[in-house]
Image (cartoon, coloured by chain):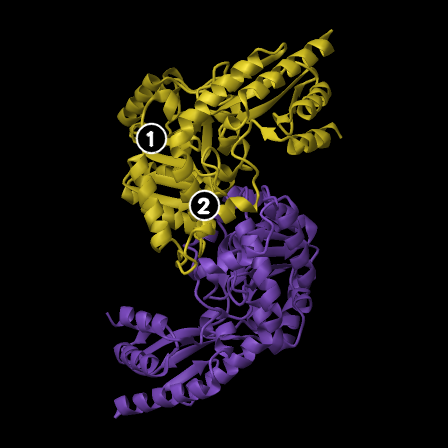
Chain colours: A purple, B yellow
């Protein structure tokens, strides 16, 4: 009840601090509006639309080749499978809150028979010590930048370099879950190619910070990507036409890839507002990308009710849902995008002042 | 050289006997043109767009539930995996030219560890005797209607009924590769639901006779389809948004599902034209759907050269490529659709008269 009411109030709000806008059909229509209808579809991985885009993204990532996939789930399982097959070791290592471990119904285990070793405590990012301390031989280590499930935290760049060096010395392939890779470039002050150079294979997504419809790229050396195409067909991902995703990915990539610093600045500004409220904290306290998690140290139903009132009074929506963490704590994820900048600063200030007042009031 | 010239001449021809038209961006643009841009995307298998379409197709197929998949490759491997898991027998049976056997890079074996038993000779469709004669225990038998790789041949309906009865008696699940199911309804004189009633699970495609962009439906009982959703996620097919495929599938389904008898009549008319030419035969001689294969009993380069001349003189394109079968034989696949009806009958006659003359001439 509170949940539906919160979502409705959020949708009704004039402004939203989240993302780029609604995921509706206009996202597709806008991307296709100016294109020549006579343009030919890609065909099973071939054709100008897919080949040009793959080459463009390979260039951006500084990798030899790139292959477009319908999903990151498919792309990453395939990357790990290839590295396991090469080494003949069906074992990889990744963070306990890795996408493959918690969101994919164990596809990696059930389809590929690959055993994952969980590295590091789930509350922090993987460090060099965790990797050096691995007891079993592994074919591949997966690093996720930023580590989404803990608010989008990042290791220091030097740590990445050290892990990369260690893996190369030990014959362990290093794979990047870069679903939000472009989103962390402003923090690192590096190019995508500089970061990808530390990794043997890289996956990026087009519907997070880029704001496309769906789809992913898997990039790496030519032999690796050629092998990935065979697995793409095995998975049922070598569709006759992927252009609805490719064209929208390309369109929004061009529109947003150079705005990641603005989204990052927005996230820091917004986190400061949240942290200024009584009983609210963010993780990380100071964001390192366009994302962070917000923790309300109050019961979920109370927070929902207060948020609804705040949206109605200010016209600013913060979130459409909050997730219960414990009896007196709830949380949600923020990802800033185009929408944040359109909120007048004064309005934002009023919103958080009101939110803070209501929380204080309730806390009495 | 001859190949590229043939394709170019085919593209340049005013008319084409094949399909519904070009696979270009207009296919998508037309399907989306009249839709409200505010309509919300599906989200990971939920939402009105995907749920409504799944229910509509389930109804048409007379099955309890239907699940939309990005591809038939994914849908069918998953169907077979579920039936194998239920029976704890990792073995299925299908035709030697089954899509899973020759077009999927052995995904069924490499991802699911399922062993296929090849049934019947590759030159004919599966009969009751082939199934009764199976020596190993199998979890599932897959039948493809029509059998595409041999020109789209069909067993008699009574054979289907007998195989279905036998499988039910023996505890063997029967799966339908119905990529072109709607295309065979006019020949059988049955509804989709009547045919599907003989099967435990059914896959249909939306970019053959329907002419959509991509995508498939897997239909069956509720427990089966619920399980298929878990595997869809494992395969990386549970995309955040599948609406580009769903909306186009729905749009062209409505437009074409009731025109299959016309495509079928067109195929019969066209096959008669081909069979009237010296040194050309079709398989089957009399089509049983909108498809058949054309065999030219001449060398490929000779056929290419003659076809180019015919297209240029008549403005009617037959095919953009022919495949070498042997030194003095080549072939290609016909699928009739909307385009065939737009060719004036007189023009068609002239085209085949000219083709026949040129073949006779060359044969001297």
Position of A108 compared to B11: left or right?
left
Give the total number of marks visible in the rendering.
Answer: 2
Determine whether label 1 and label 2 are within 8 Å by CB: no
- Outermost residue toward the left in this view: A1
Q: Is residue B164 above or below residue B32?
A: above
Give me the disc on residue B306: none
Give SS at disc 1. Answer: helix
Check disc 1: other Cα within 10 Å, few if <14, some if 14-19, many if 20+. some
Q: What separation in Å lies between label 1 and label 2 (alpha carbons)? A: 21 Å
**Location of residue B205 in the rendering, given as x and y in whole percent from the top left corner:** 44, 37
N-term-proximal mark, 1 vs 2 = 1
> Could you tell me which residue is drawn at 52 percent across and 75 percent down?
A290
> Could you tell me which residue is drawn at 39 percent across and 34 percent down?
B257
Give me the disc on residue B192: 1
Q: Is residue A81 visible?
A: yes
Q: Which residue is mark 2?
A: B248
Q: Is residue A363 above or below residue A35?
A: below
Occupied quadrant, residue A248: bottom right
């Amino acid at each position: 009840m509170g949940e539906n009411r919160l979502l409705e109030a959020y949708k009704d709000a004039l402004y939203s601090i989240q993302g780029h806008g609604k995921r509706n059909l206009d996202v597709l229509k806008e991307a296709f509006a100016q294109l020549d209808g006579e343009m030919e579809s890609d065909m099973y991985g071939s054709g100008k639309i897919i080949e040009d885009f793959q080459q463009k993204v390979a260039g951006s990532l500084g990798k030899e080749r790139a292959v477009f996939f319908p999903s990151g789930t498919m792309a990453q399982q395939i990357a790990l499978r290839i590295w396991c097959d090469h080494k003949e070791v069906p074992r990889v290592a990744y963070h306990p809150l890795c996408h493959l471990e918690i969101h994919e119904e164990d596809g990696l285990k059930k389809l590929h028979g690959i055993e994952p070793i969980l590295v590091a405590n789930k509350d922090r990012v993987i460090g060099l010590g965790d990797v050096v301390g691995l007891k079993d031989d592994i074919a591949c280590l997966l690093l996720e930048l930023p580590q989404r499930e803990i608010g989008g935290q990042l290791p220091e760049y030097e740590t990445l370099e050290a892990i990369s060096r260690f893996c190369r010395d030990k014959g362990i392939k290093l794979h990047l879950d870069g679903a939000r890779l472009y989103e962390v470039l402003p923090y690192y002050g590096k190019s995508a190619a500089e970061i990808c150079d530390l990794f043997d294979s890289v996956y990026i997504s087009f519907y997070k910070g880029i704001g496309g419809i769906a789809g992913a790229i898997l990039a790496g050396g030519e032999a690796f990507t050629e092998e990935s195409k065979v697995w793409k067909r095995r998975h049922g991902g070598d569709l006759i036409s992927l252009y609805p995703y490719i064209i929208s990915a390309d369109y929004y990539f061009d529109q947003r890839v150079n705005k990641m610093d603005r989204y990052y600045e927005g996230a820091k500004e917004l986190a400061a507002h949240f942290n200024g409220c009584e009983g609210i904290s963010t993780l990380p306290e100071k964001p390192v990308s366009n994302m962070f998690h917000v923790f309300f140290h109050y019961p979920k139903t109370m927070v929902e009710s207060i948020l609804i009132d705040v949206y109605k009074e200010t016209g600013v929506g913060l979130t459409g849902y909050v997730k219960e963490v414990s009896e007196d704590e709830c949380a949600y994820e923020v990802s800033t995008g185009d929408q944040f900048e359109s909120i007048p600063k004064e309005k934002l200030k009023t919103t958080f002042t009101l939110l803070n007042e209501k929380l204080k009031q309730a806390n009495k």
